[in-house]
Image (cartoon, grey):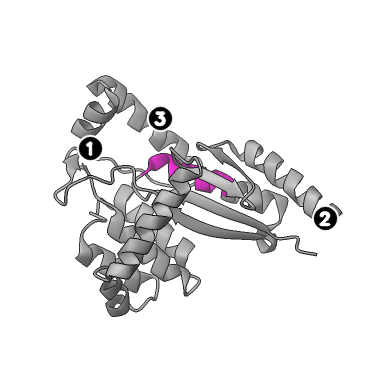
Amino acid sequence: MNNTIKLDIISDVVCPWCIIGYNHLKAAIEQLGIEDRVEIEWQPFELNPDMPAEGENLRQHVARKYGSTVEESKNARIRITGIGAEHGFEFNYFDNMKMVNTFDAHILLDYAKEFGKQTELKLRLFSAFFSEQKDVSDRDTLKQELISVGLDAEEGMRRLDDTQRRSAIRNAEKQWQQMGVSSVPTVVFNRESGVSGAHPVEGYKQILSELMAKADAE
């Protein structure tokens, strides 16, 4: 009997609702006491695949992409900061914050998966970008984050210029999009069903409880 639940979390490290959603999901798992029965794998998704290397001012980016006014953008950041704080995550927005390209980060997350450190690196990158005002497209920053989670930084950085590795991430992104993923976070349960958006803790608990009951009945 395989009573493990496989969770594929499709997300980007510069997506605020992705860390909020994960913290809600994590709380649901902990409240149900099923940490040892859940397997999480992070999957790549770029909110802005065409973002140039120099990035774009976050406020200008939000206005251009979503048509938000300055006031709407400010209120959204206040709301996000409050929701994040409910589960201990600090959003530290600042005037010159930039939206950046995240493709290299996804390559390194795939590398970290090989050593069982994918979630650890993912959370580090969320914190680096949103809490510590770091540029997660900068290779020196990425190298330091690899070191911080105990990974071989030199080997990891070599992956960034590996044509096959880059192609594999592109293909993975396309595969999830072809499966209907168009927004993040999206959580796919046992490769059978999925939900998009940052759901509340109780919503994730209900889904997980139903999946556990089904697994135990098989």
Q: Nearer the viewer, mark 3 or mark 2?
A: 2
User: Can you identify the residue that label 1 sits on?
Assistant: 58
* Callout 1 amino acid: Leu
Main secondary structure found in the magenta portion: helix
Residue depicted at 64% across the width and 53% down the height? 190
Q: Residues within 10 Å of mark 3 (few under 14, many from 20)?
A: few
Q: Position of residue 133 (x, y in %)?
A: 25, 50
Q: Secondary structure at mark 3?
A: helix
Q: Quadrant of the C terminus?
A: bottom right
Check the image and name the residue furthest to the left. Answer: 54
Magenta residues (range): 15-25
Q: Position of residue 43 (x, y in %)?
A: 46, 55
Q: Whole-Å distance between the Cαs marked 3 and 2?
A: 39 Å
Tell me: 93 left or right of 17.
Answer: left
Position above or below: 137 against 56? below
Q: Quadrant of the N terminus?
A: bottom right
Q: Residues within 10 Å of mark 2 (few under 14, many from 20)?
A: few
Q: Secondary structure at mark 2?
A: helix
Q: Residues within 10 Å of mark 1 (few under 14, many from 20)?
A: some
Q: Nearer the viewer, mark 3 or mark 1?
A: 1
Residue depicted at 42% across the width and 58% down the height? 122
User: Can you identify the residue that label 2 sits on?
Assistant: 216
Residue depicted at 40% across the width and 34% down the height? 80
Q: Which mark is residue 79?
A: 3
Residue 22 shown in magenta = yes
Earlier sequence position, callout 3 versus callout 1: 1
Q: Secondary structure at mark 1?
A: helix
